[in-house]
Amino acid sequence: MSATAQAQERLFALREAIAKIEGRPPADGLAPVAGGAGDEADPGSCGPVIHEDQGLESLLPEGFPTGSMIEARGLQLRDAGAVSGFGLGLCLVGRSSRPAKRILWIGERLVAREAGLPHAAGLADYGFQPGELLYAMPRRLEDALWLADAALTSGGFSAVMLEVNGNPRGFGLTESRRLSLKARSTGGFLLLVRQGGEEEASSASLRLRIEPAPAAARFLPDGSMLGGSIGNPVFRLVPEKIRLGGPRELILEWNKDDRQFYPAAPLHAGTSPAHRPTHPVALVPPPFDRSAGAPALGTVVAFDRAS
């Protein structure tokens, strides 16, 4: 039995190394055998072990990347707020290494028309300080690409966030590779935000699909937890392209005070389903100063038939 377990462990390690070389997460069913060193998996489980305390460092094990390009993608344009919010948070996390420099957000006109423009009060509530963010909205995609290239060349920004709508014809693998090489040569950081686009080939070192997630559970004064309440923004991250092995998905919560992403608590962790009575009553008592029910809408009038 021990020889079989060791053979399976070696096979898993070999397949995991191949997945890292190919730049993809380990496939389903490649979990190590339970009972090994540091193994906390259920013996009956057949999928990869995903710990609930995994954070953004599981996707960026070498720290915040400099001289690289990351892509954040949203499935639909209605999720533009979540994708942009995660992108801004990621740029703020990277700004800690270069606090003297600002963040440049190159917006897209159609996305701004559908999702709205950045709001100063909302940015402040998200954790931004005055003067930390510059927003530009070129008229053409060619101008946006030129501005991103010039911003990386200048070295005056801690992060450049380039927003594109869908899969435009003027932005393909060639333009993506050109910007990736520019970020590498200048040591800058470029975040490509693709709103409502399909998955396509790019030179990004890491591509994530971003989806909004329910607010994390909150502790009540009696010690219980309230799930689904109003709280910090929560994002669901699904890695689509990753050079180092990582989790299949992450649920992260943005903390505006620390300006960091933290693992979000499960929605109903430690709580039982809400009790619903068999015969529920009205939440609002009936009025005591007037009769219950709405008055009749007019009177019934009988007309003679014309023929």
Image: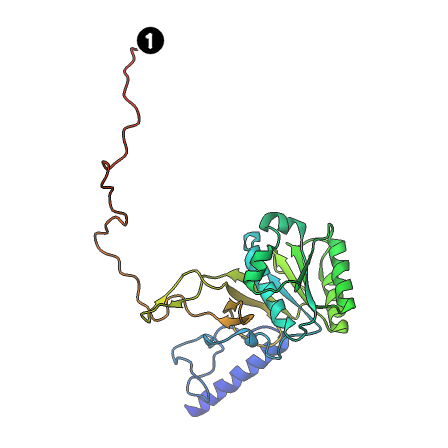
Crowdedness of circle 1 by 10 Å Cα count: few (<14), some, many (20+)?
A: few
Q: Nearer the viewer, residue 205 or 46?
A: 205
Is 288 rendered above or below residue 140?
A: above
Q: Position of residue 80 (x, y in %)?
A: 57, 55
Q: Quadrant of residue 5?
A: bottom left
Position of residue 186 in the picture relative to residue 222 (left or right):
right
Q: Position of residue 62 (x, y in %)?
A: 62, 79
Residue at the image position 74 percent from the left and 65 percent from the top: 179
Position of residue 183 in the picture relative to residue 230 (left or right):
right
Position of residue 202 in the picture relative to residue 34 (left or right):
right
How is colour applied across the structure in the image?
Answer: rainbow
Residue at the image position 38 percent from the left and 64 percent from the top: 227
Residue type pointed to by label 1: Ala
* Residue highlighted by disc 1: 306
Q: Quadrant of residue 206?
A: bottom right
Question: Quarter holding the C terminus?
Answer: top left
